[in-house]
Amino acid sequence: MTSKESRHAFALTELAVVTTIAITLTIILIPTLNHTRNAGMNQVSIANLAAIGELGAQYANDNNAAIYTFSWKAGIAYPDLKSGSTRTYNSDQEAASAQAQNILQRATGRITGPTAILHPNQRLVHRRYSHLPLADYMGVKSIMSDMWVDPADSNLLDWRNNPLGYLEQNSNFPYANGIPLEAGYDDISSWTSTSIVQLWAFASSYQVVPAAWSQDSAPTYIPVGDTPHLFQSIGGTQVPLGGRTFFEVRAPAHKVHLFEEFDREQPGSPYFAYDHAQPAKLMFDGAVNTLPSGLARSSTSPADPHTPWTQHYLPLDTFPIPLDGLGSPTQLDMRYRWTRGGLQGIDYTALLSPYRPNRAKHP
């Protein structure tokens, strides 16, 4: 072999060694980089919840200690932007849906035409959209602030970047393409209604506990056994909504106000009700904790406050699937979503909160 051939062979050997080392380092570093990225997104989400807590305290200070939520009521005339007149509504639920429509119409300018924001009267908007009145209080344009989104919630970020994406073919908006053919998803047909599908771009990654906007006992709303995404009323058709105050919370440091619906920083993005899930949770005193859900007290339905409430997680279209696959029968404790005693209840008896803001005073 000539010296030229030897140098060429040596160069190829060096290249192979360097490539092998690079691949090995990549394999070693990827989990570390993913962990660092997830930890960073978790800190952003914690900061989001803390900021929402401060704004909620400011809202309460300006509104007689009220816990922010929809405030429109049945039997009162409110502006109808499309007609330029006013309308009254038959229930607090219907009035709240109209308030959500009004807020979003003002925020987007979509009042008439094929993309107009419609009245979502088929849904109890408090479940996923209670942040809208707080955003309106801040200034209606703040509805599109990243404050309402867990940075790991990539779907919601996509919807917010393209709020008309529900009109596109192969849209990733939930149910924009109809009910999924694959069994195991929530298949209630009303999910496909345009008035519901178009709202997803304005949703939040953070859910408000029902006690923040509904009563602790009948007449009130209770969970539905077939799906964790819908609630039903008991004690009469006219359930009073809103009107709860911070003064009604017995143990603010131990009671969850908002929580991430999914722990997206863990493998599989477990639903908050899995015992090992550690979603960030805003407490009523303004602190944020990431304690495991399994450390919280068991939940009970307001319909039967002496029996623990469990149900299986049924995903919505495009949402994370159960950890043991679609159609999972695993029963999960809904924990802080349905606290026994409502605002008078306690979720965590001992807390080690990683973040506690001190700029805003809570009532």
Image: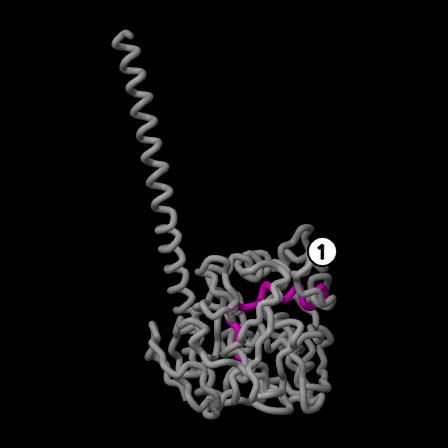
Residue 356 coordinates in the image, percent (x, y): 34, 76
According to the picture, the residue beneath numbered tag 1 turns out to be 181
Q: Amino acid at mark 1?
A: Leu
What residue is at 33 percent from the left and 41 percent from the top? 25
Image height of 269 relative to 169, above or below: below
Q: Is residue 346 visible?
A: yes
* Residue 276, picture quadrant: bottom left
Query: Is 176 situated left or right of 332 in this image?
Result: right
Query: Is 351 situated left or right of 137 in this image?
Result: left
Q: Quadrant of the N terminus?
A: top left
Residue 165 coordinates in the image, percent (x, y): 63, 56
Q: Is residue 200 magenta?
A: yes
What residue is at 44 percent from the left and 91 percent from the top? 250
Q: Quadrant of the C terminus?
A: bottom left
Label 1: state its secondary structure: loop
Q: Residue furthest left?
A: 3
- What span is colored magenta in the figure? 192-209
Q: Residues within 10 Å of mark 1 (few under 14, many from 20)?
A: few
* Residue 221, picture quadrant: bottom right
Q: Is residue 194 visible?
A: no
Q: Is residue 257 magenta?
A: no
